[in-house]
Image: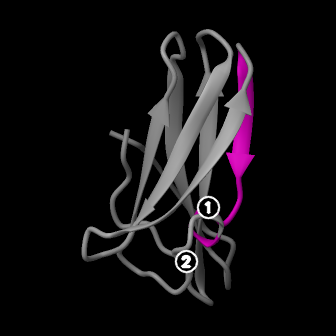
Amino acid sequence: AESVGAQQTSTRQTDLLLFNDGAAGSLTVIGIDGSGNETGRKTVGLGANQTLRIPAVLTQVGGTGSTSARVRVQTAAGMHVYAAAEQIDLGTGDLEIARLR
């Protein structure tokens, strides 16, 4: 699954929201910059029927300062993960939530 238009700036932050409706396992979050280059990876475990929030996800995968990045989620076999990107306006606290496709 992949998001488009993720941002991590002084005024906007993108958090990653995950829910695993399948078997426990590990997933990898991959940051991709606006030019299509990978900026970094983070692997995390996620149990069956568990949720996880990764705040400022781009910061954790090397995408600080980006305004047009992507976040890709790769899961292990047997996992069934629902993923959404939550963009937060840091000045007002307003949220925009979009599922990863």
In-front residue for pair 7/97? 7
Assign the N terminus to one quadrant of the image: top left
Residue 50 part of the magenta-drawn span: yes
With 99 as the anchor, is 101 left or right in this view? left
At x 30% / y 75%, what residue is drawn?
34
- Look at the picture and state if 36 lies above or below 24: below
Which region is colored magenta?
49-59
Q: Position of residue 89 (x, y in %)?
A: 60, 76
Where is residue 19, by image quadrant? top right
Label 1 SS: helix
Q: Which label was assigned to residue 82?
A: none
Distance between the alpha carbons at the discs numbered 1 and 2: 8 Å
Where is residue 74, by image quadrant? top left
Residue 5 part of the magenta-drawn span: no
Labels 1 and 2: the sequence-earlier one? 2
Q: Which residue is mark 1?
A: 57
Type of residue at label 2? Gln
